[in-house]
Amino acid sequence: MRNNNDTTYSEAIEKIMLNNGYFAPLKLLYKEIWNYKDKSKIIGKTPDYTIQERVQRDKRFTRIGLGVYALTDYLDKFPKIAEPKNEAEKTNRKHAEVQGMLLEIGNFKPEVEDTYTNDKKWAFQNKTLGSLATLNMVPAFTYEKIVKESASFADVIWFNNRGFPYKIFEVEHSTDFRDAFIKFMELQDFVTEFYCVSSEDRKIKFEREKNKTAFKPIDSRLKFLTYEQVENDYQNILKKTYI
């Protein structure tokens, strides 16, 4: 039986995926690999490139998203997403799809160290959002009250390499944006960009709420993204990369 120091890259990747719901984004593999390998003994190629090479060439792994790979023998164990039966289910499906794309895009970007979502059980292309994110919990980057009562309820957060929230996204299908803005206000003292994602026809309502005096401290950092913009960004990156 091998000890941690003898574990090959492919074996380590396999273990990480088994612990993460049979798949993992590359960024999670980069972080978790050192639970199974001795970093001090690594010689030659940078570990990240070696991991990319293994998941691309080893038939044990199959690409299932933007920088996301799965255990080939376990693809049939992924949750099957049923067709939505009503408007509420359609809304939840859209919400999860946008969050999933944002998580995968964030994991792909070099300036993003970690990703987080509150909606861990929802799924995007049969991949649970909790397993797409690299963090299960929001790190204690500030007062506990702000982390627990505000940041932890965010739809998607991208963290920078210093562990601070870099960009926060709220998917707002039909709400009036106020709850999202209030959540953002709690984080106004950080150098963070705040995004609301919704359909194009709701931009006027976004601007109307944004211009209210109560949100003046963060109005220059409040951004609006359409579903189409997120989807186009995701598809464009997916087409241009092999990882």
Image: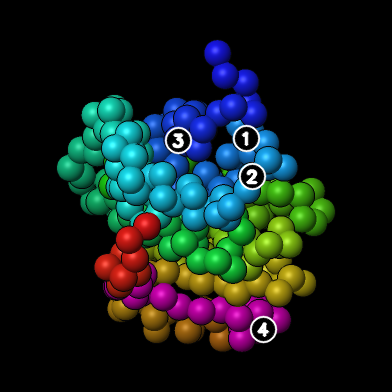
SS state under label 1: loop
Residue in front for this viewpoint, 149 or 14: 14
Question: Which part of the image, by quadrant, shows the C terminus?
Answer: bottom left
* Place of residue 18 in the rendered image (x, y in percent of width and height, measured from the top left): 45, 28
Q: Which disc is residue 10 wearing?
A: 3
Range of magenta residues: 212-235
Could you give the CA–CA distance between mark 4 and mark 1, rounded to whole angstroms?
50 Å
Residue in front for this viewpoint, 65 or 50: 50
> Label 4, on which residue?
216
- The tag earlier along the polypeptide, 4 or 3, is 3
Q: Amino acid at mark 1?
A: Lys
> Label 2, on which residue?
42
* Place of residue 188 in the rendered image (x, y in percent of width and height, measured from the top left): 72, 72
Could you give the CA–CA distance between mark 1 and mark 3, rounded to whole angstroms?
11 Å
* Residue positioned 47% across, 70% down in the render: 196
Q: Is residue 106 left or right of residue 68?
A: right
- Of badges 2 and 4, the one in the foreground is 2
Q: Residue furthest front?
A: 44
> Label 1, on which residue?
37
* Place of residue 210 in the rendered image (x, y in percent of width and height, measured from the top left): 55, 81
Q: In the image, is residue 143 above or below residue 224?
A: above
SS state under label 3: helix
Q: In the image, is residue 161 above or below residue 59?
A: below
Q: Is residue 60 left or right of residue 142?
A: left
Residue in front for this viewpoint, 190 or 53: 53
Could you give the CA–CA distance between mark 2 and mark 4, rounded to whole angstroms?
51 Å
- The tag earlier along the polypeptide, 1 or 3, is 3
Whether residue 64 appears in this view of the structure is yes
